[in-house]
Amino acid sequence: MKIKSRPNILFLMTDQQRFDTFSCVNGEIRTPNLDKVIEDSIFFTNAYCSNPSCVPSRAAIMTGKYPSECECPTYITQLPEHETTFMSRLQQAGYYTAVIGKQHFAGSQIERGYDEEHIIDGHSAFANSATVKLYHDYLEQHGIDKSSLMSKGLISGGTWNTDSKYHLDYFIGELGKEWVAKRAQKGRLEKPWFLTLSFPGPHHPYDCEGTSYADQYNLDELSMPATDYTDLDQKPQHFKMMDSYSNIYLKDYTKEDFLKTKRSYYANMSLIDEKIGEVIQLLKENEMYDNTLIIFTSDHGDFMGDFGMVEKMQCLSESLMRVPLFVKPPVEGFIGIEVDDPVVNIDIAATCLLASESEVCEQLSNFPYNGYWSDRIELKTRNHIYMEAGGIKGVIKDGIKTIHYMNRDYGELYDLKRDPEERHNLWEDPDYVHHKLECCRLLLDNMYRAIPKSNIPWNIGTPDI
């Protein structure tokens, strides 16, 4: 196998996509094009995000640091100007950088690091016009009244009323195709390129019911979740207090409402799959596929029925924290592999920097994925997963998840090997005290790293502790 030097990089991203939404994992959903790329990729079956909310999770991916480290720990925080995105670092390495789709810098004044920007930060035509101006312009050019696109009626969504080509994710896919086609025309003498192609779906509003993509799914073939609202009894009280924020509990809707919502969610993924497939085909037709590092992930997941909920909330449940992640190396003839090592998608930054032949500075998370295909790069694996949700911090070690709540005497602890659905909270179980203490130590270690200058020695010449 021949590894290409300084490859092009295509970073594909979705929003609020569950880890089990590939047809090679879940027979209920149809994603044939993504499955084909997975066949050429390292497919991580045990991948996590750092935070269950868009802004902090994306900030962590962009900087290669945990949300608390890059000072963007919650949805209503912003990346400070003094931080550096890995796209800026790629620019410094000589890459031409571009973005199409959602970024969610959320008003941050940071230097984003793109030579070319087509940012669309909303999730539908009903979003604030400033965040989706390109999309609104597209609809206006085609004489489409944005108010007529969807009729509300599902849980956090509704039925699509017009041609699918006017859907936001379809539009972004078309922009991606146009961009790749133009880069192909510029020839091989151009700089290597980096493109973020970021779809706002399948995030709510779940609005693909009524499309041809939804027609691929029969309601009676879709499953109900294994858990329900009663399973929240063992969890902290805020799990049952989301009514004041969003109507996300299935108990307030019919079974048909939920199944149509799930079909809409799956249909949105099938739409995205189709557009990504067309982008990949362009890469192949223009002989760029083998020389392109392709990375696919999402910022966080979706309950989609688990515990009787849809959407997301401030918690560290597997439904939200596990994410899809695969990497297609820039290696001609690479045969894909499945890897169950625990990984976090904030290491996309280190992976891209190493692919660009740049150094990964000390401040960044440095467990890059390159070692899975390159003998020149050390393969480093994590011995635990760390995750955050504002005042909630969690660790997964040896298959056991421990979750600490700031200023609370309760918490969560799940033995994921015995209880993958997190139905039995073992926080007070005496058999798990030793593990709880070990994970609390790991929590402290990770939290210390977020303290400015925590890596500075005590004094010159003093012994290491």
Image (spheres, rainbow, N blue to C red):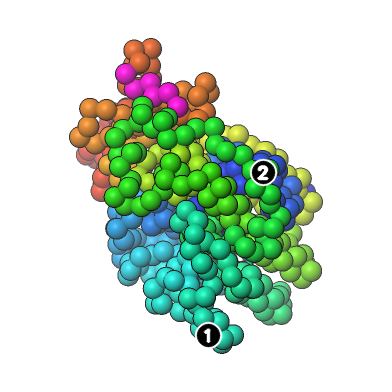
Q: Are marks 1 and 2 in contact (CB under 8 Å)?
A: no
In this view, 341 is above or below 350? above
Residue 384 as seen in the image, left or right of residue 226: left
Residue at image point 57% right, 34% down: 341
Q: Pick whichever, 99 or 449, lies toward us.
A: 99
Residue 250: give its label: none
- Label 2 sits on a secondary structure element that is helix
In this figure, what is the number of numbered marks? Answer: 2
Q: Quadrant of the C terminus?
A: top left
Label 1 or label 2, whichever comes before in sequence order: 1
* Residue annotated with mark 1: 140
* Residue annotated with mark 2: 220
* Residue 144 spot, x, y in % from top left: 55, 82
Q: Nearer the viewer, mark 1 or mark 2?
A: 2
Query: Which quarter of the picture shows residue 109?
Result: bottom left
- Label 1 sits on a secondary structure element that is helix
* Residue 354 spot, x, y in % from top left: 55, 53
Residue at image point 37% right, 35% down: 394
**Residue 176 painted magenta:** no
What is the three-letter code of the residue carrying label 1? Glu
What is the three-letter code of the residue carrying label 2? Asp
Residue at image point 45% right, 43% down: 250
Highlighted range, magenta: 423-428
Does the rendering let one see residue 70?
no
